Image: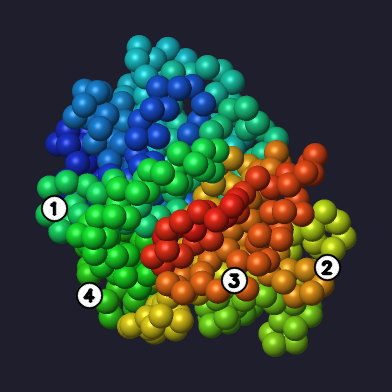
Amino acid sequence: MDIKQSLISNNIWWNSEKISDQFLQSRKREEFYSIIDKIEEKRILSIIGSSGVGKSTLIFQVINYLLEVKNIDSKRILFFSGDDPSLFFDESNKLSDIIELYFKEILMESMPNLHSKVYIFIDEIHFIKNWQNYLKICFDRKYNIKFIVTGSSFIHLFKDANESLLGRIENIYVLPLTFNQFLNFYMTYSSKKEDIILPKFDIDSPEISFKNLEYIYYNEELKLIVQDILNKYILVGGYTEYFEEKNLSIWQRHLADDIITRGIYKDILIMYNIKSPKILENLMYYIADNNSQTFSYSGMTKNFGIDTVTLISYIGYLKQAFLINVLENYSTNIGKIIRSNKKLSILDNGICNSLLKKKEINSNEAGHIIESMVDFDIRLICERENYNEYYYRNSKKEEIDIILDRKIDIIPIEVKYTNKIEKSDVAVIKKFVESNKDNKIGKTKYGIIITKDIYKKEGDIYFIPY
């Protein structure tokens, strides 16, 4: 198949002027609306997320929006993938060859003289050599083209591209669904008529947010519905393909065999020329079996028979592929942070359970999973706002699960997913808040304890049911 024929096959809307329902999910993620809001802006738009999270579905939903809502001429929308062997079957094939052929033989217009905007979607762009140089040229020449690209991780997408695309590209992160997002996907696929809108805890307005939680906390019927869906989320995780499958055994096999394998062997292995990919896979199983626990690099190197530099690199690859999260111990001393043990967790609880082949979750396991879920929620805030996330453990072995460093203040967060919280469970976080209250840098105004069903405020500590 030649390049032109391949493009025609990929862009079926050129003939039908619509997209088949099989490429469109019944529910749209929040990120869809972020893309739509920016679709007419000049900057290149990058959609970044792990393999299998739904980036391609988002692209087709946006294309469908352009066709049906914006009434864009179907041939002014081009889509192709950077890992399509029918396009990149030869190393001599360049990104410029494909796009220029499209303008010459499909659109029959020249790039400098377009009579209206063209939308070019490039999936998995990190597989294309020197892609950033070509997009920079198009952007700087002010061609009337909107580029929307996807990549499987931040490092992949911007390897060797940070400098050339500075000020020309904007990022939208697409990660596994948070519980709030999962809740409303579940309602849609269960044919429920209305969404359940859970109040979000706004860290800038804790008093108002805390007050807003009352309506759901005292609504027992609504709480039962939400808790039932939460139990499912704890088990299956936040990948949207679950709603197309729903059989737990098949779904877990899909997560373990497809998403993890694709993330490790397709993305990380190819991009970084990994010599021992099996170690990456074993690292995932090891972290899952010790989820949200602290590790020393020296201990892990002995377990895996690799040197510290290789281990740090491998853990970094898994984090940037959005498969795991890594927390360092909070300290005002940079040297202590570097030397401290790290807390590692699997980013998506469904992947963690599939690796361990768990079909049911007991109360003790649920506590660890909820901690990793809160960790995930905080990482999303940090990615979006450029904050930092840590855990805390001092010389007396007093611990706090998460420290959110917002540069202007510090918010300690402890996870106690239980209905019985002792004074000793609260002592460390109270002490942390008190000792940092008057700091000029790193001031702590309040702390949060995530509970199972306890809703109250004691002094500067908010107790919030997950």
Give SS at disc 4.
Answer: loop
Asked if residue 229 can be seen in this view, the reply is no
Asked if residue 121 can be seen in this view, the reply is yes
Q: Earlier in the sequence, mark 3 or mark 1?
A: 1
Label 4 and label 2: CA atoms lie apart by 44 Å
Dot 2 corresponds to which residue? 339
Q: Which amino acid does label 2 sit on?
A: Arg
The residue sitting at 19% across, 29% down in the picture is: 68
Q: Which numbered disc, 3 or 1, marks the residue closer to the eye?
A: 3
Dot 4 corresponds to which residue? 247
In the image, which disc is placed on residue 423? 3
Label 4 and label 1: CA atoms lie apart by 20 Å
Q: Is residue 416 above or below residue 179?
A: below
Give SS at disc 2.
Answer: helix
Q: Which amino acid does label 4 sit on?
A: Asn
Q: Which amino acid does label 1 sit on?
A: Lys
In the image, which disc is placed on residue 372? none
Q: Quadrant of residue 253?
A: bottom left
Q: Which of marks 4 and 1 is nearer the N terminus?
A: 1
Dot 1 corresponds to which residue? 192
Q: Position of residue 112 (x, y in %)?
A: 47, 15
Q: Where is residue 160 in the image (x, y as percent from the top left)?
A: 68, 44
Q: In this view, does 112 lie above or below 229?
A: above
Residue closest to the eye, 66 or 33: 33
Q: Which amino acid does label 3 sit on?
A: Lys
Q: Position of residue 265 (x, y in %)?
A: 52, 70
The quadrant the C terminus occupies is bottom left
Q: Is residue 128 left or right of residue 27?
A: right
